[in-house]
Amino acid sequence: MKTFKIGLMGCGMIASYGHLPAIMETDGLTIHALYDPNEQSLQHEARRYSVPHAYSDLDAFFASGIDAVVICSPAPSHLQNFIDVAAHNLPILCEKPLAMDAEEGQTMIQIMEDQDLMVAVGFCYRFSPCALKIKELIQQDAIGDVRSMRLIYNWDCHGKYYKPDPLNQPDFWIEDPRRRGRMDEGGPMVDCGTHQIDLARWWTQSNVSRFQSHAAWVDDYEAPDHVWVHMDHDNSAHTMVEMSYSFGHTTKDRISHFLYEIIGTKGMIRYDRNFSHFELRNEHGTYQLEYHEEKNFHGMYEAFYEALSTGELGNLCSVEDALEVTRIARTATTNLIENRHGLSVV
């Protein structure tokens, strides 16, 4: 089995808890080098995962002998990362959202086509055994034609406040910078909501013909922190995606709500993370299905290994699909902000 040396750009939280452990656990992949301009974050992750090469210098990173690059930096940095990697003609797996707007995304597509690069976008929800099972059941006509989907993820995005030094200053709280960062980048629909938009298109194999959005501002950010997007698909299905970063964000006891409901002409599928419940109901009866969590970084990296080996993306998300997902999420959010401020909406 060939082993691919992976270089990872961006040593933040998503790399630490998701990408780096999954790469380590995937046969045929090895973490060869890290890049981050923040020396503290860089060295922390290098020590934690025993990565042999860690650089805050781009030239040294690309000279380290890597075979492919994973981009885990914040979304505003993706385009420049993409340009830097393309200059070295290396395959890419880029964290979602792909780009900050459609213009950036089109630039990425043009670079990819000009350089003939293999690029995948990291929608790890696709690789949960439950998401794969839903896709299989829909393809097998287990619930007939899909007509309605309700995809919900309401949570607190780490809570509004935290104690930076609970031992020495137990009563001192500050706003959580992780939550602030996600809100400044566009809020819940642009961040987590892209997973649900992607699943809706991927499960149905149907594009979104039109959509509209609604929102509530629980906190005073530019972007709304509780958002609904209603999408009409070309195949006559309708999807409602609900995303919140303010679901109990100031409460003592945390709570979240994660649900998939897919309704078809012959039955329905229901996935409820809160109760570890996954079932199919149709004209033949009710079937309890094996439950798994909604994310699967390891499955995504197994698919990335296959893509590096064969040149085929398989179930990995393409740049074109990721750009359409980003367009829907970003436009829905921008329209809400402009409506709130009384600006014209295009």
Image (tube, helix red, strand yellow):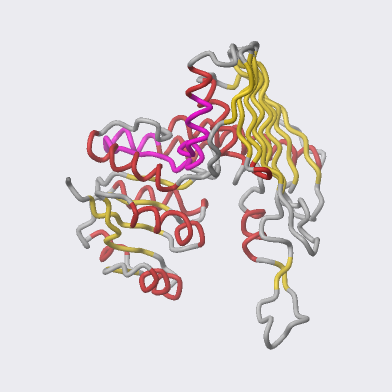
- On screen, residue 209 versus residue 229, left or right, reads left
Residue 346 in sight in this render: no
Q: In this rendering, would 155 be left or right of 185?
A: right
Image coordinates for residue 98, horizontal then vertical, percent: 48, 42
Segment tinted magenta in the rendering? 109-135
Image point 79% across, 37% down: which residue?
339
- Along the line of sight, which residue is nearer the eye, 287 or 330? 287
- Does 119 lie within the magenta span? yes
Q: Position of residue 109 (x, y in %)?
A: 39, 35
**In which quadrant will I find the C terminus?**
top right
- Residue at the location (59% across, 14% down)? 234
Q: Quadrant of residue 336?
A: top right
Q: Residue 12: where, in percent of width, then height?
A: 49, 62
Dominant secondary-structure state across the stretch colored magenta: helix
Is residue 311 within the magenta segment? no
Residue drawn at point x = 71 percent, y = 49 percent: 256
Quadrant of residue 19 within the rendered picture: bottom left
Tell which of 251 and 46 is nearer to you: 251
Q: Which quadrant does the N terminus fall into?
A: top left
Res 43 → quadrant: bottom left
